[in-house]
Image (cartoon, helix red, strand yellow):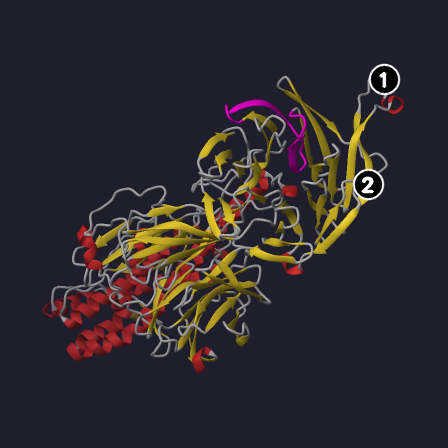
């Protein structure tokens, strides 16, 4: 749970798409992307109640999964006892009778401890068991009754919040004791050494590990996860982890934040459009189609202002939080757009929650900067930014503030507008006073959305009623206001402009005025005296007009509410030069042989992007949210899993749906084709993995089987290189293995899978990626990971806005990594392109796609053995930033 300022505005509370009973412990982000109209935040008390509720849900989830785990272990024990008895009969019939007598009580079994020295001592152990059989029988009855009551009353238990987690750990311990004895029996029968099981039931939080020869236990939220060490690791303790030989450079940023931010698009004299998304300010050269990036912000950028010299830029950000949920401090950066060098940082420790609006003064060559923050009072402050000196500060209003500007002719005059107000500020001798605009006989709109200064000196405002209001000074009405009344700012003229809100206004060089509409999506050109001259309408798929930037008086740049930037003219129309998603994204897949990738999310859009040309190839809208996807190995089709249990297969050429199926009624979390494309595995939130036979080049799908055994929703899965086995993770931190070729059979002995090679590695839990988990992780801190095709590195998407790059394999704790910033919310997914040239990462609520270029050592051989890691030098720390 993240906090900003004094409130907790859900940074990592819930995923926006539905979760089942285990909600990934409620740590998914709902970022601070609410509009300025609702920037006052939610009450502290409500936030604290949400934290407590989520903590209880976490405990309930852990107990439910542990209880299911315990019952599954009991069933496994019952299934293996008959086989054990048959094996013992061949060795010693008398011992088998003793075992049958002592191990079964009304269908429940408890293995007795036997000597592990050799078969010669077996008769002695059998006699001891026979002598104590009556005592054993009584204890078994009690054990049966205790576990039966726990299973029968699980519903009641789940409603109790105190000590749920500790009870779950006790239950795990008791069932571990039952199951640990089976290898002892097997060892006696085969006259071989005992398999070394690690019994470390330390219930402490975090990721402390214990090692002993062939297996190692990793603890997440007190739950032990056993990892089996591959045979080629001779001495696990001597393995040393190092930084990967490759690094990442930010290559391209897809998307634009137009859905809830204003005045966020400008054109520089260099020919670059400057705008922002997530934590990055993008400088996109329209003609050359290249990007540069200003990346010094630590959280989402919310506002921009261009200095009168058209070179320097001011950008303000939200406060953000650290990984422990503690609020960070927002600030404003002033930087040089030519060199991307930061010139000044102002306001650190002054602003609260975030910076909502910034503006440079004009009449004095940009000496001052006005800032309005997102605190409850929306503090207005004026800074001599070169000297980092605050000249004045005053409370603005408790209502939302949408825009602020200096008068172009007088630095001492400032105007701000927002919900139900327009204020005219005067700065004098370090103090700022305000006068409220008087609406008089005109209807007071709910919002004053924007304003401009006309070349005639008038102030023109656009409101939520679709009107443009012309304001001017008026002599005081002594009859109404009494003696001593001062001049006021009143409406001189009202002009009907748009249907719906007037979102933006822009003054052209010749004095003409442009206005952009919300509901009608129109751009209207007005003369200086507000006579309409020309108009056009942007396509509906791009949304409403958010902001307008003048290019040369004829050509325009238009930012829209559906996160697109358009370029065009009144006569020729507009085309999109920047596009992006509209809501949280989760699905990401890269093409097996081309530099293209697919994204999908809660906005129901499925987008196919070209990583070389940095463009959107095509986009289609589905009926439901798309949450996962995978390309067919032949590269001609792609499967997309939806939020309702439905999944579709799309033809990349025709964009048509060639197959439409449904598995269950809960959301799908992972789609994965086998390496040869003959099978498709579909992981669902109903705890099942559905397996399909794939024929006709990926166009025909028939149900082959269903993998049943997980006690929580499926989160990740991978196929083995031979296409016969699956490794899967679930929401309760479980690792299971499946023999698909033998009929989707659950492999009970996970030890047998320790040396299996995997075609891909996206499971976040496994021996090869243990080291990516930080100390104190709670199991949901890592949303996704992906091994490179060269098998030399692994990229990780975490809940703290970071992308990590680790060496692969990474089986040791505290492994060093390169950390990369840029996202402004939890990172939901990462994938390498087919030749490891690029890495793609998805932001959640920031709706941002970052494309990173992989640089450094070549990918080399596609096989890198674990044992080679033992010769790598260790590194005790990791850089803060990989750039």
> Which residue has dot 2 on it?
494
Is residue 403 magenta-colored? yes
What residue is shown at x 66% (from left), y 42% (from top)?
Answer: 37
| Image position, residue 604 (x, y; %) | 57, 62
Report whether residue 474 is seen.
yes
Q: Is residue 879 above or below residue 753?
A: above
Q: Earlier in the sequence, mark 2 or mark 1?
A: 1
Q: Residues within 10 Å of mark 1 (few under 14, many from 20)?
A: few
Q: Is residue 812 above or below residue 43?
A: below
| Image position, residue 303 (x, y; %) | 57, 40
Towards the viewer: 513 or 406: 513
Is residue 556 magenta-colored? no
Q: Residues within 10 Å of mark 2 (few under 14, many from 20)?
A: some
Tag count: 2
Residue range in magenta is 385-411
| Image position, residue 865 (x, y; %) | 22, 61
Q: Report the residue that reaches farthest toward the bottom.
A: 696
Q: Which mark is residue 542?
A: none
CA distance for labels 2 and 1: 29 Å
The quadrant of the picture occupied by the C terminus is: top left
Secondary structure found at label 2: strand
870 with respect to 692 (left or right): left
> Which residue has dot 1 on it?
483
Q: Is residue 411 above or below residue 331?
A: above
Towards the viewer: 589 or 876: 589
Viewer-nearest of discs 2 and 1: 2
Q: Is residue 702 above or below residue 273?
A: below
Towards the viewer: 298 or 767: 298
321 with respect to 116 (left or right): right
Report whether residue 21 is seen.
no
What residue is shown at x 50% (from left), y 68% (from top)?
Answer: 640
Q: Report the residue that reaches farthest toward the left.
A: 120
């Amino acid at each position: 749970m993240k906090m900003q300022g004094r409130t907790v505005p859900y940074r990592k509370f819930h995923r926006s798409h539905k979760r089942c009973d285990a909600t990934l412990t409620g740590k998914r982000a709902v970022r601070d992307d609410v509009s300025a109209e609702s920037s006052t935040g939610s009450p502290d008390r409500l936030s604290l109640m949400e934290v407590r509720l989520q903590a209880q849900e976490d405990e309930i989830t852990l107990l439910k999964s542990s209880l299911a785990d315990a019952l599954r272990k009991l069933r496994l024990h019952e299934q293996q006892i008959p086989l054990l008895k048959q094996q013992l009969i061949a060795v010693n019939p008398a011992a088998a009778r003793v075992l049958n007598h002592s191990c079964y009580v009304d269908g429940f079994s408890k293995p007795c401890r036997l000597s592990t020295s050799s078969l010669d001592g077996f008769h002695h152990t059998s006699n001891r068991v026979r002598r104590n059989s009556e005592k054993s029988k009584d204890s078994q009855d009690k054990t049966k009754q205790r576990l039966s009551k726990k299973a029968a009353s699980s519903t009641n238990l789940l409603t109790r919040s105190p000590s749920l987690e500790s009870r779950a750990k006790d239950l795990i311990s008791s069932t571990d004791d039952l199951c640990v004895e089976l290898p002892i029996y097997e060892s006696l029968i085969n006259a071989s050494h005992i398999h070394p099981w690690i019994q470390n039931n330390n219930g402490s939080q975090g990721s402390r590990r214990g090692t002993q020869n062939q297996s190692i236990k990793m603890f997440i939220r007190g739950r032990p996860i056993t990892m089996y060490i591959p045979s080629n690791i001779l001495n696990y303790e001597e393995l040393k982890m190092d930084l990967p030989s490759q690094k990442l450079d930010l290559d391209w940023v897809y998307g634009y934040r137009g859905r809830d931010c204003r005045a966020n698009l400008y054109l520089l004299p260099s020919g670059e459009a400057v705008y922002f998304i997530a934590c990055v300010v993008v400088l996109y050269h329209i003609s050359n189609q290249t990007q540069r990036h200003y990346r010094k912000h630590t959280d989402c950028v919310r506002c921009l202002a261009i200095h009168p010299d058209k070179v320097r830029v001011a950008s303000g950000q939200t406060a953000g939080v650290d990984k422990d949920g503690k609020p960070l401090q927002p600030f404003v950066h002033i930087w040089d757009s030519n060199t991307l060098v930061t010139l000044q940082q102002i306001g650190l420790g002054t602003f609260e929650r975030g910076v909502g609006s910034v503006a440079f003064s004009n009449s004095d060559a940009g000496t001052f900067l006005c800032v309005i923050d997102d605190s409850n009072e929306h503090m207005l402050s004026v800074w001599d930014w070169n000297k980092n000196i605050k000249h004045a500060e005053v409370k603005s209003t408790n209502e939302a503030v949408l825009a602020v500007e200096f008068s172009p002719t007088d630095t001492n005059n400032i105007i701000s507008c927002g919900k139900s107000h327009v204020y005219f500020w005067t700065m004098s001798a370090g103090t700022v006073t305000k006068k409220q605009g008087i609406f008089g006989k005109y209807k007071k709109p709910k919002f004053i959305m924007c304003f401009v200064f006309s070349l005639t000196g008038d102030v023109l405002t656009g409101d939520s009623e679709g009107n443009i209001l012309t304001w001017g000074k008026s002599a005081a009405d002594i009859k109404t206001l009494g003696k001593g009344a001062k001049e006021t700012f009143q409406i001189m003229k009202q002009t009907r402009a748009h249907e719906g809100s007037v979102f933006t206004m822009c003054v052209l060089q010749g004095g003409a005025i442009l206005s952009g509409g919300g509901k009608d999506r129109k751009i209207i050109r007005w003369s200086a005296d507000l006579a309409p001259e020309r108009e056009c309408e942007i396509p509906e798929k791009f949304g409403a007009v958010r902001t307008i930037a003048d290019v040369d008086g004829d050509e325009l740049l238009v930012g829209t509410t559906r996160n697109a930037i358009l370029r065009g003219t009144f006569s020729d129309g507009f085309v999109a030069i920047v596009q992006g998603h509209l809501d949280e994204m989760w699905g990401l897949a890269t093409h097996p042989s081309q530099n293209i990738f697919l994204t999908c999310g809660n906005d129901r859009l499925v987008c196919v992007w070209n990583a070389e040309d940095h463009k959107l190839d095509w986009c289609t809208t589905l009926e439901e949210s798309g949450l996962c996807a995978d390309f067919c190995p032949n590269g001609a089709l792609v499967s997309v899993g939806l939020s309702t249990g439905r999944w579709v297969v799309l033809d990349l050429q025709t964009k048509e749906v060639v197959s439409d199926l449904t598995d269950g009624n809960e959301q799908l979390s992972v789609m994965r084709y086998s390496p040869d494309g003959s099978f498709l595995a579909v992981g669902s939130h109903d705890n099942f993995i559905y397996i399909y036979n794939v024929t006709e080049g990926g166009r025909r799908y028939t149900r082959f089987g269903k993998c049943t055994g997980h006690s929580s929703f499926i989160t990740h899965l991978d196929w083995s290189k031979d296409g016969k086995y699956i490794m899967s993770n679930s929401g309760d931190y479980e690792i299971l293995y499946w023999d698909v070729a033998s009929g989707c059979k659950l492999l009970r002995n996970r030890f047998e899978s320790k040396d299996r090679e995997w075609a891909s590695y996206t499971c976040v839990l496994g021996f090869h990626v243990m080291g990516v988990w930080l100390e104190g992780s709670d199991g949901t801190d890592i949303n996704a990971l992906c091994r490179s095709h060269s098998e030399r590195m692994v990229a990780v998407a975490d809940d703290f806005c970071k992308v990590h790059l680790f060496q692969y394999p990474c089986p040791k704790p505290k492994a060093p990594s390169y950390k990369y910033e840029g996202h402004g919310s939890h990172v939901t997914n990462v994938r390498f392109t087919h030749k490891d040239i690029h890495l793609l990462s998805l932001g959640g609520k920031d709706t941002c796609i970052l494309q990173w270029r992989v640089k450094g050592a070549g990918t080399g051989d596609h096989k890198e053995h674990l044992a080679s890691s033992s010769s790598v030098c260790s590194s005790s720390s990791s850089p803060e930033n990989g750039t």
